[in-house]
Structure formats: C-alpha cells, structure tokens
Amino acid sequence: MIQDKVAQQVAARLQVSFDAAQQARLNEKYPTDPRVYEAYIRGVTGLDERAGGEESMPQMQTTIDFFKKAIEIDPKYALAHAQLAFAYAWTAVVTKNSIRALECECQRSNLPGRCS
C-alpha cells in the first residue's frame, strides 16, 4: 500500500531504526476479512451521515452496532475500537446536551414537580 511505502520512506529519512518486533508491527496489514472492513466502513458512513442532535440517536445506535460487529469478528481491529469510542463520546455529549436543555426548560417554566 502507498501508506506503507510513505511510512517507510519517512522513517528512512529520519534515520529511525526499528527492532524486529517494531518492524513486524509496521508491516502488519489491515484485516483481510471483508466482513470486518464492510462493518467498519458502514459504521464510518453512519458517523459521516449523522445530523447534529438528538434526532441522530437511532442512526448512531446502528453505527455503534456496526463497529461492535467489526470488533466481534476481529477483536484486534484498532480502527473499529477507536471509532466506537468516538461514537460513544458523541452520544454522551448529545445526551448530556439534551438533558441540560430539558433542565433549562424546566427552570424557565418554573412549574413544581415537572423538573424533579
């Protein structure tokens, strides 16, 4: 892959030397199982297509499920783990903002019993 060649050229120009274990890690390839890659790409697509708020939550759950599927098939696929973490973080922010908006609305309404 071109990324591998670029990484090797950069390392060579920086005169970085790697031991055998590090070199082996550099030469590792992405998963060959097309199911892993398909689930990962479908999850990434879901992230790209999400809207900005709470209306995206059902789609985000589907996106999370795709990343989980990729991880289930190949637990060592780091990209799926990273994107799953991002999806969870995004969900937490949206949920927190929704709760905060609801609390503000309750405080503005000043109606006893509705805000507890």
Image (spheres, helix red, strand yellow):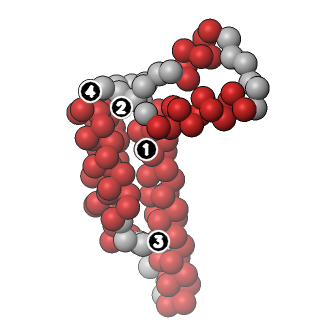
Pointers 1 and 2 in contact (C-beta within 8 Å): yes
Identify which residue is drawn at 31% across, 46% down.
Answer: 41
Nearest the camera: 17 or 104? Answer: 17
- Answer left or right for 76 relative to 36: right
- Answer left or right for 107 relative to 61: right
Mark sitting earlier along the chain (1/4): 4
Q: Residue furthest top?
A: 20
Nearest the camera: 63 or 26? Answer: 26
* Residue type at tag 3: Ser
Pointers 1 and 4 in contact (C-beta within 8 Å): no
* Residue type at tag 2: Ile
Nearest the camera: 8 or 32? Answer: 8
**Label drawn at residue 71:** 2
Which type of secondary structure does the marked residue at label 4 adopt?
loop
**Label drawn at residue 84:** 1
How busy is the neighbourhood of tag 1: few (under 14 within 10 Å), some, or many (20 plus)? many
* Residue type at tag 1: Leu
Alpha carbon distance from label 3 to label 2: 29 Å
Alpha carbon distance from label 4 to label 2: 12 Å
Identify which residue is drawn at 39% across, 25% down.
Answer: 75
**Label drawn at residue 33:** 4
Which type of secondary structure does the marked residue at label 2 adopt?
helix
Identify which residue is drawn at 68% across, 11% down.
Answer: 19
Q: Is residue 65 visible?
A: no
How busy is the neighbourhood of tag 3: few (under 14 within 10 Å), some, or many (20 plus)? some
In the rendered image of this protein, does residue 30 appear above or below residue 99? Answer: above
Alpha carbon distance from label 1 to label 3: 21 Å
How busy is the neighbourhood of tag 4: few (under 14 within 10 Å), some, or many (20 plus)? few
Mark sitting earlier along the chain (4/2): 4
Q: Is residue 47 visible?
A: yes
